[in-house]
Structures are given as structure tokens and as C-alpha cells.
Image (cartoon, rainbow, N blue to C red):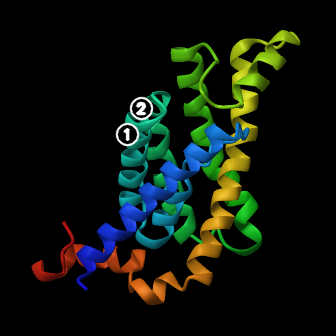
Amino acid sequence: MKKKTKMQMVIVMGIVFNVMGAFIAMTLSIPFYMDSIGTILVAGLLGPKYAMLTGVLGSITSGITFDMYSFYYAPVQLFTGFFAGLLYHGKWLKGWRTPIGSLLVGIPTSLLSACITAGLFNGITSGASSTFVVVFHHLGLPLVFSILLVQVFTDYLDKFFAVCLTKVIIERGHLYEKWGIAWKDTAALKTSTKEKSFF
């Protein structure tokens, strides 16, 4: 099987993980999102560029099928894919660094999510975390601060869960060995022959 085909299959698998995770989270009213599992999986296997593509396509698919809010959060997936790809291959999402790396992924995504949630939806979306925004706001906290507080906490839980699950999937499934794909290979191919290019 050609590497281009393998990469396309990994991206499709990532999109499926994102959509399934988001659907489960929304259906069961889980207070975090589970919509970036596939993005982080692809970030670990292929690097930031393909993770960003996976995240955006996952958001579009979710938006078309069951959650219109997902369209508006596609830029968040760009941030997730970019930072997860860099940090995963910079060893910040491995071993004892995992909690720190998850926070480094979660902070920029939570800031962007908070801006979108406050600016477009006044704090209320399809996510179960909106309940906490309402509670904090009714307790006297400013709306924007309430949104930011909830986003930072939920994004951290979401990214930490996604990173840990991704590591299990990659390591237990021996995906590097089965697919023969690693980010350093995709980066190196930029200067290699035309036959080895992916897109």
C-alpha cells in the first residue's frame, strides 16, 4: 500500500474518531467535548499539517450531520492540530510531560473557544459545559470570565483525555509499525523525489 493511501486512511480514521467522540459527548451530555481525539491521533502519526486538516474536516462533518455549532469551532481544531503536532513530536505529550503538554495545547484552544462562545453565542452552545457558564455567571462572575474559566478547565480535561487515549491507541495498536508512517518521514519527503510526495 502506498504511503499516500495510508495517510489518507489515517486522516479518515481521525475524522471518524472526532465525529463519533463529539456525538457521544453531546448525546450523553458529557461536560467536555471529545471532538479532538482524531485530531490528536493524526498529530501524533502525521504531524501538525494533517492534524489541522483532520480537525477542520471533522468539524464540518459534525456540523452537517448533527451539531451546527461545530462549524463555528473549526478554527479551534486548527489550533489543536497545530499545537498537538508540535508538542507531540517535541516530546511534550509523552511520559511525565503529558499533563504539562496537554495544558499547553488546551490554553490557546480555550482562549479561542472562549472568544467564539462569548462573541457569537453569548456563552450558550450545544455543549454540556454551557450549564457551568450559566451557574458561574449567576453567582456574580462576569460572563466572559465565566466562559473563559469553564473553557480552560474543560479544554484541559478534554485534551488530556484525548492525548492519553491517543497514546494507548498508537502504542497498543502498534500503528507506527503497521502503517509505517511517522511525522519525520512526512517532513523529510518535502525534499525527496516526486514519487514519494503525498499530495
Distance in Å between CA atoms under marks 1 and 2? 6 Å
Marks 1 and 2 close (CB-CB < 8 Å): yes
Q: Tell me: residue 63, above or below residue 179.
A: above
Horizontal relation, residue 152 to residue 113: left or right? right
Q: Which quarter of the figure has residue 7?
A: bottom left
Q: Which residue is mark 2?
A: 71
The single residue placed furthest to the bottom in the displayed view is: 177
Q: Residue at x 67, y 43 (%)?
A: 155
Q: Residues within 10 Å of mark 2 (few under 14, many from 20)?
A: some
Percent of width and height locating residue 12: 37, 61
- Point out the residue furthest to the right here: 139
| Residue 134 coordinates in the image, percent (x, y) | 77, 16
**Picture disc at residue 80:** none
Image quadrant where one finds the C terminus: bottom left
Tag 2 secondary structure? helix
Q: Amino acid at mark 1?
A: Ile
Q: Is residue 129 above or below residue 12?
A: above
Please, is residue 182 above or below residue 111 in the view?
below
Q: Label 1 neighbourhood size at 10 Å, few (<14), some (14-19), many (20+)?
A: many
Q: Which quadrant would the N terminus be assigned to in this image?
A: bottom left
Residue type beneath disc 2: Phe
**Of pointers 1 and 2, the one earlier in the residue sequence:** 1
Residue 30 vertical position relative to residue 182 in the rendered view, above or below: above
**Residue occupied by mark 1:** 60
Task: Please state which of residues 6 and 194 is positioned toward the viewer in this rendering.
Answer: 6
Q: Nearer the viewer, residue 145 or 42?
A: 42
Does 173 sit left or right of 102 as displayed? left
> Residue visible at 70% across and 57% down?
161
Residue visible at 52% across and 71% down in the picture: 89
Q: Quadrant of residue 113?
A: top right
Q: Position of residue 17 (x, y in %)?
A: 51, 58
